[in-house]
């Protein structure tokens, strides 16, 4: 039962353009969402998060959008840089004391020069 | 401020042996989470611990796996009688407190079972 889905295994974007990574979820109890970036042989690095009471959160080049009615979130990276090439995971949690995260399968982003 | 430390980074075991994975949380963090990543998959939650307490072990396999976070020292994930299917990357994360605090991940331990 995949509660968090990233349907695009890979994405290729030109340097300087916008990268848009998508994530869908099925559990309506999720109320907190995060994006992590992961390089090979390293642990995930936190990028940005959003609470379900918001529909947008920005941090520098990164913006996360949340559409609760569609159970969909997206991460926008503008402008994309070569160092952004990595695997991106979205994650969700239900706040019930333990903040265990449910992860999507990941999307491999490649930024082409 | 040192990040989350995990050791060893790579661990090779033969079937039937025991694997011990260690995790030292970030300074000031009292909450530890373990996740497992199988090849080409996302991370799957295993267990959430505080000092001397297991808070949520709903993701732990019922047999052969155990975890602890003693009053002193690192958190330990122990896998007894390893099988080939245990080969994976095991990640530890820590947070300062329960709730909305972000989890920060260590570099992982890559377990290979021969």
Image (tube, rainbow, N blue to C red):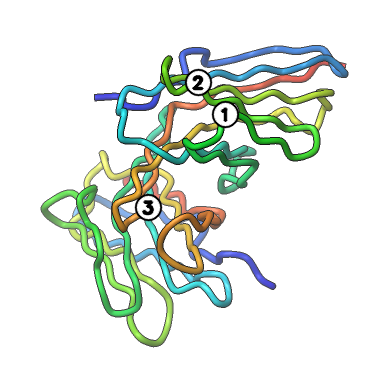
Query: Upstream in the sequence, badge 3 or badge 1?
Result: 1
Mark on residue B15? none
Q: Secondary structure at mark 3?
A: loop
State yes or no: discs 2 and 1 in contact (Cβ < 8 Å).
yes
Q: Is residue B31 above or below residue B100?
A: below
Residue underneath mark 2:
A67
* In the image, farthest residue toward the front: A53
Provide residue A9's location: percent of width, then percent of height: 52, 16
Q: What separation in Å lies between label 2 and label 1 (alpha carbons)?
A: 6 Å
Q: Which residue is mark 1?
A: A55
Mark 2 near mark 3, Cβ–Cβ under 8 Å? no
- Residue drawn at (57%, 45%) of the image: A44
Relative to A17, is B108 above or below? below
Residue B69 lies, with reference to residue A91, above or below; the image says: below
> Going from the N terminus, do you reach mark 2 or mark 1 first?
1
Graded by Cα atoms within 10 Å as few (under 14), some (14 to 19) or many (20 or more), the crowding at tag 2 reads: some
Q: Which residue is mark 3?
A: A99
- The quadrant the C terminus of chain B occupies is top left
A67 up-or-down from A92: above or below: above
Question: What is the x, y in percent for residue A74?
Answer: 58, 22
> In terms of depth relative to the viewer, which is nearer, A73 or A56?
A56
Q: Which residue is located at x 63 percent, y 41 percent?
A: A48
* Callouts 2 and 3 on one subunit: yes
Q: CA distance from mark 3 to mark 1?
A: 21 Å
Q: Residue at x 82, y 27 (%)?
A: A82
Same subunit: marks 2 and 1: yes
Q: Could you say whether the residue bearing mark 2 is in a helix, strand or loop?
A: strand
**Mark with earlier residue (2, 3):** 2
User: B30 left or right of A18?
Assistant: left
Q: Real-space Cα distance between discs 2 and 3? A: 21 Å
């Amino acid at each position: 039962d995949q509660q968090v889905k990233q349907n695009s295994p890979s994405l290729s974007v030109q340097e300087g353009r916008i990268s848009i990574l998508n994530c869908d979820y099925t559990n309506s109890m999720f109320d907190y969402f995060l994006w992590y970036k992961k390089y090979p042989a390293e642990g995930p690095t936190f990028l940005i998060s959003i609470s379900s009471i918001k529909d947008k959160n920005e941090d520098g080049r990164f913006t996360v959008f949340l559409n609760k009615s569609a159970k969909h979130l997206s991460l926008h990276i503008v402008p994309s840089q070569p160092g952004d090439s990595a695997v991106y995971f979205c994650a969700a949690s239900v706040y019930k004391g333990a903040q265990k995260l449910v992860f999507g399968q990941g999307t491999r982003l490649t930024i082409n020069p | 401020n040192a990040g989350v430390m995990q050791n060893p980074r790579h661990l090779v075991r033969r079937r039937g042996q025991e694997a011990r994975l260690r995790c030292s949380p970030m300074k000031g963090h009292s909450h530890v989470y373990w996740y497992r990543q199988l090849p080409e998959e996302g991370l799957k939650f295993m267990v959430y611990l505080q000092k001397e307490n297991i808070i949520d072990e709903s993701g732990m396999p019922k047999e052969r796996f155990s975890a602890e976070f003693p009053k002193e020292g690192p958190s330990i994930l122990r896998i007894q009688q390893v099988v080939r299917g245990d080969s994976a990357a095991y990640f530890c994360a820590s947070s300062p407190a329960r709730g909305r605090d972000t989890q920060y991940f260590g570099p992982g331990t890559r377990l290979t079972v021969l």
